[in-house]
Image (cartoon, rainbow, N blue to C red):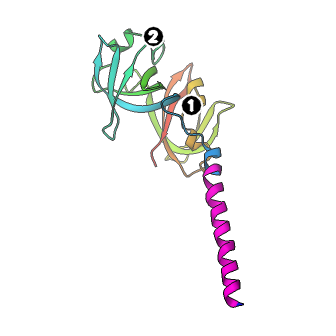
Amino acid sequence: MQGETNMRSNLQTSAMVAGLVLIGPAAASAQQPVPIYGVTAKIALEDTVEKTYEGLNAVLVKTRDGVEYVFHLTERTVLHGGKTAGGEVLRGLDEGSRVVVHYTVEGERTTADEIDRVGVDGLRAVEGVITHVDRHAKTLSIQLADGSRQTFRLTERAAADVGRGLDHAAAGTATVVVYINDEGGRPIAHFFTRVS
């Protein structure tokens, strides 16, 4: 009798574990869609310009962790501010300069849609803890180190594609760097990324 009860209990436990294994990945994938590389994905990241290739209309950039990427430029690629496009973008980039590249992956080709310079004549970085993200209203609010709060308007691209993993972070748990510029006297956020 005791052996039969233990066996029944073990079968029930095995069935529950099997159910959790089957449900777990499905629930996780429903929360955050994974970009399908080799098809199409829109991504942004911060890099340092290593080299420009005018003849190929491409730029080689290196991330903080040492990974190098080649981004192809098209006639629609713009440098922050929309002042230059296409081949002119290369002339606006200096080797060693920091940039944020918004790009599209189609198959194995990475195409730069927009390149934002960081620093002088470009975006400036502000660090703080996320308190609220509202993609519908296109706003991002952070708390600065001095305790004050600041709200930034997000660009269309930032509202649509940037920092998706931070939408559900509990308020006050994600420290980010926000790359902004002032447009018409208002701070506009072009990109933000988690730092801790």
> Which of the pair 89/152 is nearer the observer?
89
Residue type of the residue flagged with mark 2 = Lys
Residue 139, how many percent across, how many down? Answer: 63, 33
Q: What separation in Å lies between label 1 and label 2 (alpha carbons)?
A: 23 Å
Q: Which span is picked out in magenta? A: 2-26
Could you tell me which residue is drawn at 72 percent across and 90 percent down?
A: 1
First reached walking from the N terminus: tag 1 or tag 2:
2
Q: Name the residue beneath numbered marker 1.
A: 161
Could you tell me which residue is drawn at 63 percent across and 66 percent down?
A: 17
Residue type of the residue flagged with mark 1 = Asp
**The residue tagged with tag 1: helix, strand or loop?**
helix
Q: Is most of the magenta stretch helix, strand or loop?
A: helix
Residue 179, how many percent across, how many down? Answer: 47, 31
> Which of the pair 61/170 is nearer the observer?
61
Could you tell me which residue is drawn at 62 percent across and 46 percent down?
A: 168
Residue 99, how many percent across, how many down? Answer: 39, 27
Could you tell me which residue is drawn at 57 percent across and 51 percent down?
A: 172
Can residue 149 be seen by looking at this rendering? no
Q: Answer whether residue 115 is magenta in the image.
A: no
Q: Name the residue beneath numbered marker 2.
A: 83
- Check disc 1: other Cα within 10 Å, few if <14, some if 14-19, many if 20+: some
- Check disc 2: other Cα within 10 Å, few if <14, some if 14-19, many if 20+: few
Q: Answer whether residue 7 is magenta in the image.
A: yes
